[in-house]
Image (tube, rainbow, N blue to C red):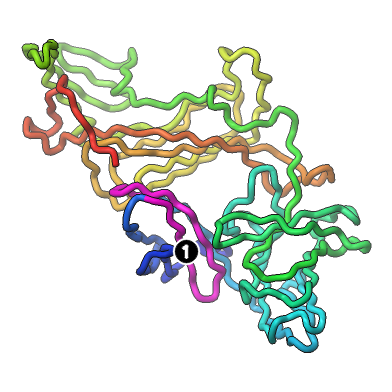
């Protein structure tokens, strides 16, 4: 996506580190790229005139995985020539960022571009939890080491008090992690945040620690229960008549006939001949029932009710996100999965891994300054599980029919 327009980026180039080949994004900004096997891969996304973004992904063979939406930022229009002999001061077009090069500090003559990244979603990766994003920039030419230090300045838009120590970190594309740099401070006139840097490594992020309200916390694993479809856990709302039943919550119609038992390996096994509409069009409900404060869990201090909560659910290359108003009572956050992957292909019977990320969002301040952060802080907890799909669309007994009671093995790479 284009960070400034929120529109899809066409013809962005997508590659995998250490893997030959590339693909382009389509008119919707979408792409698919094959991996050679199971493993950890670095996805590199580039487009002429924009900053580049990387994503680290874990892939299982034969399974699709969603990378998540990257927001690329158009490079700043201001280009400043810095000579090796005389140095100079490079700025962005807004005048909010500058880098001052003393004479002899540049390794050679440089055409310097400073591109502001004001929104955290524009960063190559989220900054570690507990840190509040202030500003960030993307430097070109990347990976340039200076002969002597240069001075990097960012305008003090939040009016932090003079002499406030401000933190700085850079993004290392090779290791895919943020690396802390020497701290900077507010200049005596209060106009600039100032740092000493010795290289253009790629993306620099300016931050302060977060200060959260008392008893703000991430979702408690003990207070989140995985949602199961009512077809697997029938409730009293299901209507039963003879051998048939229908459950309004799931919309599933089922029919069951008991067959004569059989003996195998010295054990008696009961068999049923069963029809389930959910196996004709396989589907599953994936999510959690989450109570901010579960009255059954005694001894834990009560969690502060968040401003909002959110859930991100990923399965087979599909990703859905929703945000809800914070509530101290229980909430169900679930996604009805239609049993297809990101290419809209119906999946065969098997176990499919999913990831659920729950977040509590709270207002926060920049450290001890008392200045509120522009965005709430997300405290996250990730849950992993498997969704079982039973696809009997092409059953030899007829679509939706199956013989239950036999020992089965389902593929799981």
Q: Give the vertical position of 226 relative to 315 (above or below).
A: above
Residue 306 at x, y percent in the picture: 64, 32
The answer to which of 196 and 162 lies nearer the viewer is 196
Q: Is 265 on the left or on the right of 307, as rendered? A: left
Q: Is 334 on the left or on the right of 189, as rendered? A: left
Q: Is 287 on the left or on the right of 374, as rendered? A: left
Asked if one can make out residue 27 in the rendered structure from this viewpoint, the answer is: no
The answer to which of 295 and 55 lies nearer the viewer is 55
Secondary structure, mark 1, is strand
Q: Give the vertical position of 105 relative to 218 (above or below).
A: below
Determine the image quadrant of residue 77: bottom right
What residue did someone put label 1 on?
A: 44
Magenta-colored span? 39-64
The answer to which of 281 and 66 lies nearer the viewer is 66
Q: Give the vertical position of 310 relative to 62 (above or below).
A: above
Q: Is residue 406 magenta?
A: no
Determine the image quadrant of residue 134: bottom right
Q: Is 197 on the left or on the right of 284, as rendered? A: right
Residue 350 at x, y percent in the picture: 25, 36
């Amino acid at each position: 996506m284009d960070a400034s327009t929120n529109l899809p980026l066409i013809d962005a180039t997508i590659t995998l580190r250490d893997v030959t080949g590339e693909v382009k994004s389509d008119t919707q900004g979408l792409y698919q790229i094959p991996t050679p096997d199971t493993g950890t891969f670095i996805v590199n996304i580039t487009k002429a005139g924009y900053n580049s973004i990387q994503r680290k992904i874990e892939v299982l063979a034969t399974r699709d995985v969603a990378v998540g939406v990257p927001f690329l930022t158009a490079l700043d229009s201001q280009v400043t020539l810095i000579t090796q002999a005389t140095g100079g001061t490079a700025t962005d077009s807004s005048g909010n960022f500058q880098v001052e090069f003393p004479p002899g500090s540049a390794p050679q003559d440089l055409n310097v571009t400073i591109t502001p990244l004001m929104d955290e979603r524009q960063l190559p990766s989220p900054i570690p939890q507990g840190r509040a994003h202030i500003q960030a920039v993307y430097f070109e030419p990347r990976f340039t080491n200076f002969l002597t230090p240069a001075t990097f300045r960012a305008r003090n838009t939040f009016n932090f008090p003079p002499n406030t120590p401000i933190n700085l970190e850079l993004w290392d594309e090779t290791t895919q992690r943020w690396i802390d740099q020497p701290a900077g401070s507010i200049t005596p006139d209060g106009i600039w945040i100032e740092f000493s840097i010795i290289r253009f490594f790629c993306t620099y992020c300016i931050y302060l620690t977060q200060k959260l309200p008392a008893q703000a916390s991430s979702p408690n694993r003990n207070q989140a229960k995985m949602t199961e479809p009512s077809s697997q856990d029938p409730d009293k709302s299901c209507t039963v008549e003879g051998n048939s039943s229908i459950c309004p919550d799931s919309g599933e119609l089922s029919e069951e006939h008991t067959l004569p038992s059989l003996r195998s390996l010295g054990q008696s096994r009961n068999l049923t001949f069963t029809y389930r509409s959910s196996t004709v069009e396989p589907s599953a409900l994936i999510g959690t029932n989450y109570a901010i404060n579960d009255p059954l869990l005694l001894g834990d201090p009560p969690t502060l009710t968040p401003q909002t909560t959110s859930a991100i659910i990923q399965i087979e290359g599909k990703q859905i996100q929703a945000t809800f108003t914070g509530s101290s009572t229980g909430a169900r956050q679930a996604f009805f999965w239609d049993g297809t992957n990101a290419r809209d292909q119906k999946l065969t019977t098997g176990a499919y891994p999913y990831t659920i990320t729950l977040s509590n969002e709270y207002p926060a301040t920049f450290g001890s300054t008392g200045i509120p952060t522009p965005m709430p802080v997300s405290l996250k907890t990730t849950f992993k599980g498997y969704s079982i799909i039973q696809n009997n669309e092409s059953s030899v007994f007829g679509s939706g029919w199956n013989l239950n009671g036999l020992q089965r093995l389902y593929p799981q790479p």
